[in-house]
Image (spheres, grey):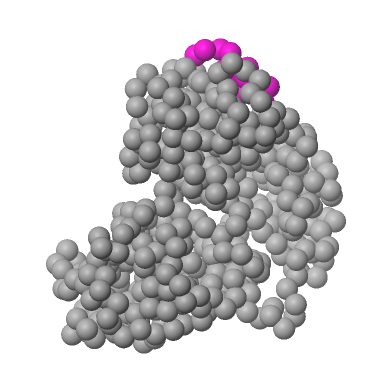
């Protein structure tokens, strides 16, 4: 349906059009969204735990985690609230390198990312491995600020950005696809921006 | 051969039935959805505009009306000068126009009277909109659940829903309104003239008969960060604070 009198809009230049998923607009800033207050996690209190169900596999403190091999990823990110931001530069530890340090292959097909504030989000394990995702420690070469999820946040840039859990403190492998915080509140279980999987009723 | 049932689009058309200017920058639009629409106080809708060439722009807007209000849903839309969708509503949209919307959406920043209280609401600017739905829901439910609303605006004339809120406050039926103006002196004895801080939050909590069961904070990102920190400093547990932020 064409909206009467809506012509202009903020059309992206045609050379970048193909990088903007349906229903998204290009944002220059970096908006902040979260369900509650911003937790201030001190790096001396920080830890990251890999779990299979309730059972811990391996736990790292801040120094141990920072000693893991670090990689850089510069990616376009897409928030479900409809903004897209180009070329966001991150540095951190690839999930592949976390698994390698723990000496395991992914034990199940599904994963829940867990956070210090009790937030969780589900991501299929295959979307975290083979170079697709990291636990980011730096943004634009600097420590990630707490409002953007620092000291460490998950980065799964090919899915809507709520899947890139802020203040991440662990990954839990689960036997079935268990909904996380927003997924229990009407958001999509997978969240592919190119298929516009925003809400649970989207296919 | 059996045809697969065609899935119903989550989008529906809604007709604008009324437009009313609330403040110099905020105007309310009432929409009559074409399909049954049942929401909870605090939820939002997505609105989608489509240009003749197929280009679409979508934004989320909180619902200001109570679920039991009937007569369509009210969205109070603030004009953003560099915006793409809000200037369309302020400059172009007219009664009778059909707009595509989707919803209700959101399952976290919601409150119903059956959830109980006391409840502390903290809003900055147009962040009051989803909180207004909660206040109206409380009123229309004829409940005694204690609710306090701390509403920060720059000036008196930018206090959205001002007359309605003061009218509800005057009833003294368990709803308490605290206005704080950041760029003008306070007009009512119980109001403030400064930015939200921990002392103000502490005093707001003391107005309630017992500590709030939940606090809902909505506004710009800077406002929400400051208000949430002030609440935590006023001994409100972080786990009881729900936030909704907009803007950069």
Q: Find residue A158 and report its horizontal and vertical position in percent.
A: 48, 76
A156 and A167: which one is in front? A167
The dominant secondary structure in magenta is: helix
Residue A81 lies in magenta, yes or no?
no
Q: Find residue A61 and report its horizontal and vertical position in percent.
A: 22, 70
Quadrant housing the C terminus of chain B: bottom right
Q: Find residue B195 and report its horizontal and vertical position in percent.
A: 56, 36
Quadrant housing the N terminus of chain B: bottom right
Horizontal arrangement in the rendering, residue A130 relative to residue B14 (left or right): left
Q: Is residue B147 visible?
A: yes
Horizontal arrangement in the rendering, residue A106 relative to residue B5 (left or right): left
Q: Is residue A175 visible?
A: no
Q: Quadrant of residue A98?
A: bottom left
Horizontal arrangement in the rendering, residue A28 relative to residue A39 (left or right): right
The vertical placement of B199 against B51, above or below, is: above
**Residue at 42% across, 48% down:** A37
B51 and A68: which one is in front? A68
- Number of residue marks: 0
**Residue at 83% across, 44% down:** B94
**Residue at 24% across, 66% down:** A47
Query: What residue range appears in magenta?
Result: B162-173
Q: Quadrant of residue B236?
A: top left
Q: Find residue B97 and report its horizontal and vertical position in percent.
A: 80, 47
**Residue at 75% across, 34% down:** B23
The vertical placement of B76 against B213, above or below, is: below
B37 and B146: which one is in front? B146
């Amino acid at each position: 349906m064409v909206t009467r009198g809506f012509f202009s809009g903020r059309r992206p230049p045609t050379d970048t059009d193909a990088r903007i998923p349906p229903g998204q607009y290009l944002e220059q800033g970096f908006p902040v969204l979260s369900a509650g207050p911003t937790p201030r996690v001190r790096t001396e209190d920080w830890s990251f735990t890999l779990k299979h169900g309730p059972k811990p596999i391996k736990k790292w403190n801040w120094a141990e985690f920072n000693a893991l091999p670090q990689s850089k990823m510069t990616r376009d990110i897409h928030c479900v609230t409809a903004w897209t931001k180009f070329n966001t530069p991150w540095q951190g530890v690839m999930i592949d390198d976390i698994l390698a340090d723990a000496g395991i292959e992914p034990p199940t097909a599904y994963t829940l990312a867990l956070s210090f504030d009790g937030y969780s989000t589900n991501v299929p394990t295959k979307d975290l491995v083979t170079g697709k995702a990291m636990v980011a420690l730096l943004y634009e070469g600097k420590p990630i600020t707490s409002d953007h999820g620092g000291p460490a946040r998950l980065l799964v840039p090919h899915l809507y950005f709520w899947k890139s859990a802020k203040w991440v403190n662990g990954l839990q492998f689960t036997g079935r696809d268990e909904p996380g915080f927003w997924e229990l509140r009407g958001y999509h279980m997978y969240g592919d921006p190119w298929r516009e999987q925003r809400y649970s009723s989207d296919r | 051969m059996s045809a697969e049932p065609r899935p119903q689009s989550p989008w529906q058309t809604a007709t604008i039935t009324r437009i009313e200017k609330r403040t110099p920058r905020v105007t309310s639009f009432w929409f009559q959805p074409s399909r049954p629409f049942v929401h909870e106080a605090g939820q939002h809708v997505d609105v989608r505009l489509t240009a003749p060439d197929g280009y679409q722009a979508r934004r989320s807007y909180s619902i200001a009306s109570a679920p039991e209000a009937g007569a369509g849903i009210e969205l109070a839309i603030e004009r953003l000068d560099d915006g793409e969708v809000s200037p369309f509503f302020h400059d172009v949209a007219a009664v009778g126009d059909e707009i595509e919307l989707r919803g209700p959406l959101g399952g976290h920043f919601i409150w119903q009277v059956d959830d109980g209280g006391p409840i502390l609401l903290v809003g900055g600017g147009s962040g009051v909109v989803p909180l207004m739905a909660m206040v109206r829901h409380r009123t229309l439910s004829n409940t005694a659940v204690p609710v306090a609303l701390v509403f920060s605006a720059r000036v008196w004339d930018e206090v959205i829903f001002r007359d309605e809120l003061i009218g509800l406050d005057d009833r003294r039926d368990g709803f308490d309104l605290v206005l704080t103006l950041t760029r003008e002196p306070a007009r009512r004895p119980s109001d403030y003239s400064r930015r939200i801080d921990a002392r103000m939050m502490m005093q707001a909590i003391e107005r309630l008969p017992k500590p709030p069961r939940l606090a809902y904070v909505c506004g710009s990102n800077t406002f929400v960060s400051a208000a949430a920190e002030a609440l935590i400093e006023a001994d409100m547990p972080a786990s009881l604070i729900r936030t909704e932020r907009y803007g950069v």
